[in-house]
Image: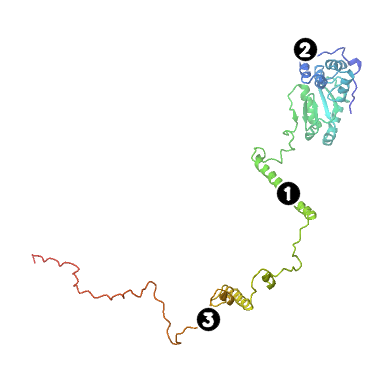
Amino acid sequence: MSNRRLAPASEQPESFAFTQENAAWAKGQIEKYPEGRQASAVIPLLWKAQEQNGGWLPRRAIEAVADELGMPHIRVLEVATFYTMFALEPVGRFWIQLCGTVPCDSCGARELKGMLQARLGPAGHVSADGNFSWLEVECLGACCNAPMVQINQDYYEDLTPESLGTLMDDLAAGRPVNVGSQTGRVSSEPQGGAATLSDPTLFDGSRVGAWRQRFEDKNKAEGDEARAKDEAASTEARAATEPKIAKPDAGRPVERPVSDAPAQRAAGGDAPIKADDHADAAERGRSIAKHGSARPGDADVLDSPAKRVAEGEPAGAEAGAQSDLPRDAVPPQPEASGASENAPAAKPSEPSTKPAEPSAKPAKSDPAT
């Protein structure tokens, strides 16, 4: 792509030294780096030497930079020949570096190259008036606005052979030129202006809260889902390693001892339960189950004949004896609450013999009548 050899000896100057101003600048660059790391300033110093020498690096300038940094000459020469931004031969007053990599080549760099060859001659050749020279270089990093060139230290983008020719004419004549896009493009926007991201709320900060909330909700949902999966996996693992213990009675009959058997009551010193007591208890249980509570006349399991005899009470036949009153006799009625046999009967109220008083006094007669 380009010739990276030093200029012929006939074009090399006898010596090179930084001016007093540039020497002070170089010293400031070297002081940016710690002791023993002065070689890190090699590129800034080479750039300043090229600028001082009219846009290209002679051998003596490369050696002067190496001596300033305490580096072998060959090490600095390796750097100078690697980067195409360092010109190793004399250049014109306006040095044109044409980007020839894929984006620019796809957008018309070949046409620009043909125009430069036709107007200035082969790459590295200085025009007869000394104004221009050109070189094809690697990517210059302005792919969005391809094709483009760098002239001295400025970028000129969105070029065509015609616009590049006009630009060169203006530079040679000293007329002002526009740096950057030559089609009016702003920065690296699409041709014709921005077509996306045109909503002002994208840039005034009003969407930051909604944007953040959206990601927080998403992260929370993903976290909940991950926790649910972990819990399910943990449950399955526990089920595999810790099987559930079956209940003792599950799936089979279990025989239990009768707690009120005659043998057990006899062993405990209790009297056996008679058949009549069992019948009374069963009858009372059926009544409670049917009516929800015991009814008058239901046998009480605790009111068995055996219990009454044990407590000295008459048996059921005596306790249930009929009254001696005749069949047609009216049974005595209980007295009213609060009444007493010795309390006298209330006398009937007597009518009053006192004449009633007039309700109002008679009005006095009018003397006039």
- Amino acid type of the residue tagged 2 in the rendering: Gln
User: What residue does disc 3 label?
Assistant: 318
Q: Residues within 10 Å of mark 2 (few under 14, many from 20)?
A: few
Question: Which of these two is toward me, 81 or 365?
Answer: 365
Question: Which of these two is toward me, 345 or 367?
Answer: 345
Q: Residues within 10 Å of mark 3 (few under 14, many from 20)?
A: few
* Residue 223: percent from left, percent from top: 72, 47
* Residue 80: percent from left, percent from top: 86, 22
Judged left or right of residue 289, residue 25 is right
Earlier in the chain: of badge 3 and badge 1, it is: 1
User: What residue does disc 2 label?
Assistant: 20
- For marks 3 and 2, give the CA distance: 147 Å
User: What residue does disc 1 label?
Assistant: 227
In which image quadrant can residue 4 be found? top right
* Residue 151: percent from left, percent from top: 80, 25
Judged from the image, the secondary structure of the residue bearing numbered disc 2 is helix
- Amino acid type of the residue tagged 1 in the rendering: Arg
Scheme by which the image is coloured: rainbow
